[in-house]
Image (cartoon, rainbow, N blue to C red):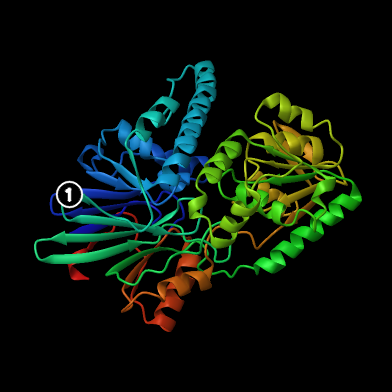
Amino acid sequence: MDMSFYGAAREVTGSCYLLRVGEHRILVDCGLIQGNPQHEQHNRDPFPFEPSEIDAVVLTHAHLDHSGRLPLLVKQGFKGPIHTHRATADLCRIMLEDAGYLNEKDAAWENRKRQRQGREPVSPLYTQAEARLAHKQFRALEYGKTKKVLPGITLTLLDAGHILGSAIVKLELKDSNQRRVVVFSGDLGHTGAPILRDPEPVREADLVVMESTYGNRQHRSWDATWQEMGEILSHARASRGNVLIPAFAVGRTQELLYVFKQHYQEWGLADWQIFLDSPMAIKATRVYQKHGTVYDARARQIQEKVGDPFALPNLTMSRHSTQSMAINKMDFGAIIIAGSGMCTGGRITHHLKHNAWRPHAHILIVGFQAAGTRGRALVDGADEIHLWGEPVKVKAQVHTIGGLSAHADQKGLMDWYGRFDGRPRVALVHGEPESMQALASRLHHELQAEVLQPEFGKRLDLTTL
């Protein structure tokens, strides 16, 4: 009975953990490695295990750094079930197929260049068809229901409150006379966030595998965050400029629509035309609308009272490129929510081209911007950005809303671990070394936890816990 760490070990992306119980092997998550092109090239490396020998997969949630290599796993021989929450299964149907489309598009672009250079073509990491094939192996579960997924392995999913369908994974492992309980936090949500419930506490574990994304940071209060957003929109309305909001298609977009509905009168939103200009975000919003049973109490009350919690009277869903292009004829009065969330591609780049140089325009940053991205350049005060090789001056006012995060901060992580009985051993994953070390120090000194920071490939003998 052992466990190996094959992703998100002393880094943030590529979550992947292999457990062996007797003759059976179960994988928790199989995520894409994300970052710069050199880093992402490792997605083509062989798996450090034989995919055909994996009996089952458990998926914590739909974000691609947790789910994005599942079609590749299937392509290379995995034939077992993929157990996950039903909302995650619905989101993955959209997200993995979209990833396949982007893989095909990237490979076609690369091959045009290679053809001119007389080099061999490359194949997509996986295609849309291969993503659809992988989705056939998904098996939908509910929160709180216990399921025997393999001999000696019992699974329970609990609400992680990170995005729709995100789950804490509790695995009870039995082999001969040995019994161990391993709990994977997945990505834990930010307490008090709109729409979703707070992360569920867990009491029993022999080992806790816990994320540490913001292990060295405290978030601003929600009240201060909403006040700041309202003030920015009021200022933008007075200056008669458009507002551009680069937003992640899953999670952040739905939070924005929900919050806009709650503050519609207070923020003067009736004076704007609001556009959701992202086909993928539109599809993801439909999934959110479908799964109202997992909302928190307030969101369920709103749904019962007024219906769709994301509907606004002046909201336009821009599905087609012609609709998107028409928005750029507006000089003022538009709030445009579009992807990609870090401004690295997608329709937001076209809106930046038409608005970033306008002094009365506003760019509202509502999510994490990784180093090296166009979004990060805007946050850092760049005087110009480059779009399709053309420099574009940045004269728009750039605002960063710091309190919006789908991840628990240091206090949230400490509080969640503190609910376990007996202070089980904890292995920190899914974090940069600095945030991981800061959280490890607090866990050890304040809660007397034994903390591990496993490296890639580390194997842990679970019978010694």
- Asked if one can make out residue 108 in the rendered structure from this viewpoint, the answer is yes
The image position of residue 412, as x and y in percent, is 51, 70
- Depth check, front residue: 423 or 304: 304
**Helix or strand or loop: what does disc 1 sit on?**
strand
With 147 as the anchor, is 133 left or right in this view?
right
Q: What type is the residue that disc 1 sits on? A: His
- Asked if one can make out residue 32 in the rendered structure from this viewpoint, the answer is no
- Depth check, front residue: 325 or 379: 325
- Residue lying furthest front in this view? 305
- Depth check, front residue: 64 or 370: 64
The image position of residue 152, as x and y in percent, is 16, 56
Which quadrant holds the N terminus? bottom left
Sort mark 1 into few (<14), some (14-19) or many (20+) by Cα contacts within 10 Å. some
With 22 as the anchor, is 172 left or right in this view?
right
Q: In this figure, which residue is indicated by the disc labeled 1?
A: 24
- Depth check, front residue: 456 or 405: 405
Residue at horizontal 47 percent and vertical 32 percent from the top: 97
Which quadrant holds the C terminus? bottom left
Residue at horizontal 66 percent and vertical 26 percent from the top: 320
